[in-house]
Image: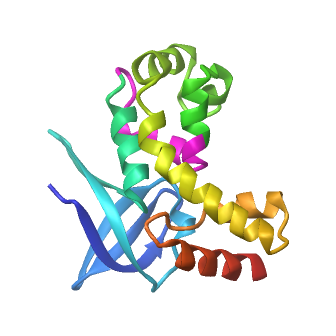
Amino acid sequence: MYAYIKGFVKEIESNYIVLDNNGIGYLIYTASPYSFDIDKEYTVYLYQYVREDEISLYGFKSLEEKDLFLKLISVKGLGCKMALPMLAGSISGVVDAIERENILYLKKFPKIGDKVARQIILDLKGKLAKSTDETIKVNDELALALKSLGYKSADINKVIKKIDNTLDIENQIKEALKLLLK
């Protein structure tokens, strides 16, 4: 079982990246492959999926993202390939939809129908808010810092999704400012 791999992104496709670590290229399925940059070093947290006919790696930029993924795939009828696109947007958005029983929000993801959306809410409501409170708190702190610098909420929300939650707040602000200045 892999916990994480640190390496350089060598290839980006629509649903995966290839991460080079010591001359070995690991194909890693990820929710937001285009949030990575070619030839930049990343630590990618992994989930290894092993079945009789398949061995796959699923990668995440943060432990919070991986934790939510693991909880999602524990839901009956929800596999890795269905859960991964749910992480492409905001983690807090998915958690909020589950806590508020927002079936329409959950059904907007590929292959998630009414039955699976209801099962997600049934299995996970009340179990996610605690684990993501810290991430939301960090995002709120970052948003307040950027707002105090005069940036608009719409711009801030777009940038926050791209920032690595594992960085300390100072480095998150630096990364956010780089993205906002582009």
Q: Residue 54's x, y, as percent?
A: 22, 45
Q: Residue 44's x, y, as percent?
A: 35, 66
Residue at screen point 60% across, 78% down: 175
Residue at screen point 56% across, 52% down: 137
Q: Residue 35's x, y, as percent?
A: 56, 67
Q: Is residue 182 visible?
A: no
* Front residue of 151 and 80: 151
Q: Is residue 35 visible?
A: yes
**Residues in magenta, as a range:** 76-92
In which quadrant of the rendered image does the C terminus lie?
Answer: bottom right
Residue at screen point 62% across, 40% down: 93
Residue at screen point 51% across, 63% down: 33
* Front residue of 138 and 104: 138
Total tally of numbered discs in the picture: 0
User: Is residue 79 one of those drawn in magenta?
Assistant: yes
Q: Is residue 108 above or below residue 49?
A: above
